[in-house]
Image (cartoon, rainbow, N blue to C red):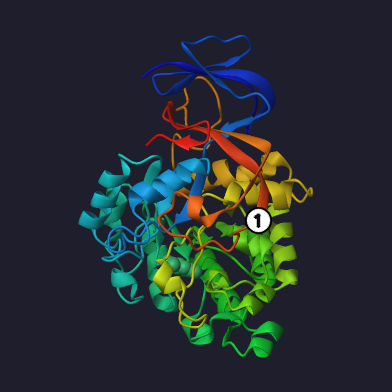
């Protein structure tokens, strides 16, 4: 593999920041310093050079729904968004509850534009009844177990999953915290807007009762628990309080829950339909505060592509979910870093090295030091652009951010030293 130097960027990682060149050879960072030379020079002036972003939550739709996304197109969208690793969610057809299916996702992912790690189901068929073969999946490299898209509603099953995961090194159980009985057939947050619009709601308690219960179970069992896409102020409080008691809890938040509210549903545009739903301004503020004080560890895209004909159905019939991989970094920079909610290093911690640690992805998340794999992203924080759905690399178009003008554009993404995005263009 050719050697190259990233020239003159602001190198930011978990250890600090400095303006420096980064020399990359044979897939590794070999030097960080001044005046480094190589056959190829990539300009990074005015740019941030960071460890590649790591997404804990990407629906890649393969196998089963390749019209909406594939591992190849999803990974390309990820690379364009600055990601060098994504964790594939298990709600595929068939689901990721079986060694052969997980092995095939990993094999396809090995040729993709970013590292594709596979989650594994907690229960067979994501039905919430019988545990999936977690030990076998762990043997294939699975570290994050989740039924995402569905909540493990049965407390006894959850307890057994936590007990089993405790015996698997590096494993974590990740809960989609929405009690199905409380969420019912609701399509948006239950509150003032749902009453006004006449749309059935999903109450905040659908999330909080599961978070409270699982914190108690994880504490009792002594196992790690991760909460996917938290959306409510009360859940942030519960996690904060549990941490002070020493519960091994981590949590993520999705970019849309940090930037949009249930008031957006007044458009009746299904692009704003997502599970868990967009909540209130109070919830948005609490999630932001939770990120800022470290209660929430990670920002995860919950990239959920859907076919246009499905997302064009009426609000209550359309499937939930929105795209995220190509907009998350710019949204975080524009909506959180620029106004001072987070500083740049806090934002990158939540987008890169903390999620890498949660998923146990060695070689991702930096630091940018000699000997470490060159999984890097180079972005211009000042470059502005407009979100145009037709120009996204994802196969789907369901972004709620169409027309938003954002600051922060990925210039280069390096996967194991290879430029998979060069001057903003995908090369794989
Ligand atoms: O909005 C959502 N969409 N929430 C989920 O949990 C699943 C996801 C999907 O797969 O489309």
Q: Is residue 14 above or below residue 147?
A: above
> At which x and y percent is residue 100?
20, 55
The quarter of the displayed image where residue 313 is located: bottom left
Q: Is residue 158 visible?
A: no
The quarter of the displayed image where residue 129 is located: bottom left
Residue at screen point 36% across, 19% down: 1
Q: Which of the pair 279/350 is nearer the observer?
A: 279
Classify residue 211 as left or right of residue 318.
right
Q: Would you name the residue on which mark 1 appears? A: 404
Q: Is residue 210 above or below residue 32?
A: below
Classify residue 221 as left or right of residue 110.
right
Residue at screen point 67% across, 61% down: 259
> At which x and y percent is residue 382?
70, 37
> At which x and y percent is residue 234?
68, 72
Classify residue 127 as left or right of residue 413.
left
> At which x and y percent is residue 235?
64, 69
Badge 1, how many Cα within 10 Å: few under 14, some, many 20+? few
Q: Which of the pair 329/86 is nearer the observer?
A: 329
Q: Which quadrant is home to the C terminus?
A: top left
Q: Which of the pair 41/375 is nearer the observer?
A: 41
Could you tell me which secondary element the residue under label 1 belongs to? loop
* Mark 1 sits near ligand 1, with its Cβ under 8 Å away: no
Residue furthest to the right in view is: 340
Q: Which of the pair 402/86 is nearer the observer?
A: 402
């Amino acid at each position: 593999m050719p050697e190259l130097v990233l020239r003159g960027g602001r190198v930011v990682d978990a250890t600090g920041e400095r303006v420096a060149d980064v020399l990359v050879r044979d897939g590794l960072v070999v030097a960080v310093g001044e005046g480094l030379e190589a056959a190829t020079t990539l300009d990074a002036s005015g740019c941030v050079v960071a460890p590649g972003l790591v997404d804990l939550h990407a629906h890649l739709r393969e196998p089963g729904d390749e019209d909406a996304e594939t591992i190849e197109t999803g990974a390309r969208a990820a690379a364009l968004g600055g990601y060098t690793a994504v964790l594939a969610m298990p709600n595929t057809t068939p689901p990721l509850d079986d060694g052969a299916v997980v092995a095939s996702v990993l094999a396809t992912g090995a040729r993709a534009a970013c590292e594709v790690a596979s989650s594994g189901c907690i229960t067979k068929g994501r039905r919430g009844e019988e545990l999936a073969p977690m030990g076998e999946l762990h043997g294939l490299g699975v570290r994050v177990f989740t039924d995402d898209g569905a909540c493990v509603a049965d407390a006894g099953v959850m307890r057994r999953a936590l007990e089993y995961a405790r015996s698997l090194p590096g494993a974590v159980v990740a809960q989609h915290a929405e009690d199905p009985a409380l969420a019912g057939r609701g399509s948006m947050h239950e509150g003032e807007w749902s009453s006004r619009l006449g749309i059935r709601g999903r109450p905040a308690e659908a999330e909080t009762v599961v978070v409270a219960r699982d914190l108690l179970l994880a504490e009792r069992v002594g196992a790690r628990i991760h909460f996917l896409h938290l959306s409510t102020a009360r859940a942030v409080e519960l996690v904060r309080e549990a941490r002070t008691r020493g519960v091994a809890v981590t949590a993520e938040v999705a970019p849309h829950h940090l930037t949009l509210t249930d008031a957006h549903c007044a458009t009746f545009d299904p692009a704003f339909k997502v599970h868990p739903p967009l909540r209130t301004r109070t919830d948005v503020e609490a999630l932001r505060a939770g990120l800022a004080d470290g209660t929430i560890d990670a920002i995860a895209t919950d990239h959920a592509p859907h076919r246009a004909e499905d997302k064009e159905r009426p609000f209550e019939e359309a499937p939930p979910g929105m795209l995220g991989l190509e907009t998350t970094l710019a949204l975080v920079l524009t909506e959180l870093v620029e106004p001072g909610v987070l500083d740049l290093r806090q934002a990158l911690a939540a987008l890169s090295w903390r999620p890498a640690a949660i998923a146990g992805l060695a070689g991702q998340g930096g630091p940018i030091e000699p000997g470490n794999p060159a999984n890097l992203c180079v972005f211009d924080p000042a470059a502005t652009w407009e979100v145009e759905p037709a120009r996204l690399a994802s196969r789907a178009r369901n972004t709620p951010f169409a027309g938003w003008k954002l600051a922060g554009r990925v210039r280069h993404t390096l996967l194991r030293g290879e430029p998979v995005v060069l001057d903003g263009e995908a090369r794989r």
